[in-house]
Image (cartoon, rainbow, N blue to C red):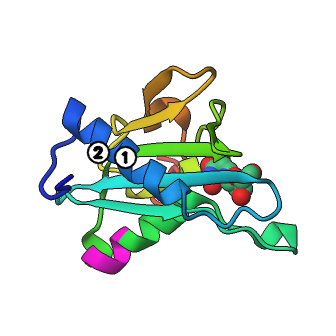
């Protein structure tokens, strides 16, 4: 599929993101958990970037799929990269894993670069039906460095 110049919120974009996430999951290095995760992000510029999880014998050193996809986007588009839509796909032993949503840390990562709280995130959870929810629903009250101190008057 031609992934160029997609718009957020369309059926075509959702399918393209799921295709890209699924393809990325096939490349995962999941030597410990056996859970092959792929993530795909649509940038505000209308391009799709994908990434997969990479595990390690020293367990905490493993990386999730979402930051790999985000890093690919930042590498290609620079600091102006922003996320317009996301899909996550997970498989184990070649079968769809249907209770994988972005973990807490990945929610924060997506939130930081999302165009806004309404950015859609697609994943198969809690069953084999697709869930499509916003990053604001996944991570309300996200941490922001722009917090202001209250000045007593
Ligand atoms: N994983 C991801 O890639 N993304 C998530 O949001 C949740 C967890 C990976 C990490 C680990 O390699 C495997 O899934 C099992 O936890």
126 or 95, which lies in front?
95
4 or 137, which lies in front?
4
Q: Of helix, strand and loop, which one carries label 1? A: helix
143 or 43, which lies in front?
43
**Pointer 2 residue Cβ closer than 8 Å to ligand 1:** no
Residue count near mark 1 (Cα–Cα under 10 Å), binned few <14, some 14–19, many ≥20:
many
Q: What span is colored magenta in the figure? A: 73-77
The circle on residue 19 is 1
Q: What residue is rendered at 45% in x and 59% in y?
A: 146
> Measured from the top left, where is residue 103 in percent x and y?
65, 46
Q: What residue is rendered at 37% in x and 54% in y?
A: 41
Q: What residue is rendered at 70% in x and 44% in y?
A: 92
> Measured from the top left, where is residue 75 in percent x and y?
35, 79
Residue 74, compared with residue 83, is above or below; it is below
Q: What residue is rendered at 16% in x and 56% in y?
A: 2
Q: CA distance from mark 1 to mark 2?
A: 5 Å
Residue 132, compared with residue 55, is above or below; it is above
Q: Is residue 140 visible?
A: no
The circle on residue 16 is 2
Residue contact between numbered discs 1 and 2, judged by CB atoms under 8 Å:
yes
């Amino acid at each position: 599929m031609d992934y160029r110049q997609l718009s957020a919120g369309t059926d075509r974009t959702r399918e393209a993101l799921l295709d890209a996430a699924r393809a990325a999951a096939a490349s995962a290095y999941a030597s410990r958990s056996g859970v092959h995760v792929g993530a795909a992000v649509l940038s505000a510029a209308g391009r799709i970037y994908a990434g997969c999880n990479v595990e390690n014998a020293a367990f905490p050193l493993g990386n999730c799929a979402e930051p790999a996809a985000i890093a690919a986007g930042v590498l290609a588009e620079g600091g102006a990269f922003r996320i317009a839509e996301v899909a996550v796909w997970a498989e184990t032993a070649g079968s769809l894993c249907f209770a994988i949503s972005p973990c807490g840390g990945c929610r924060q990562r997506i939130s930081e670069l999302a165009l806004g709280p309404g950015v859609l995130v697609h994943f198969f959870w809690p069953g084999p039906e697709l869930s499509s929810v916003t990053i604001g629903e996944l991570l309300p009250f996200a941490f922001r460095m722009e917090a202001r101190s209250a000045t007593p008057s």
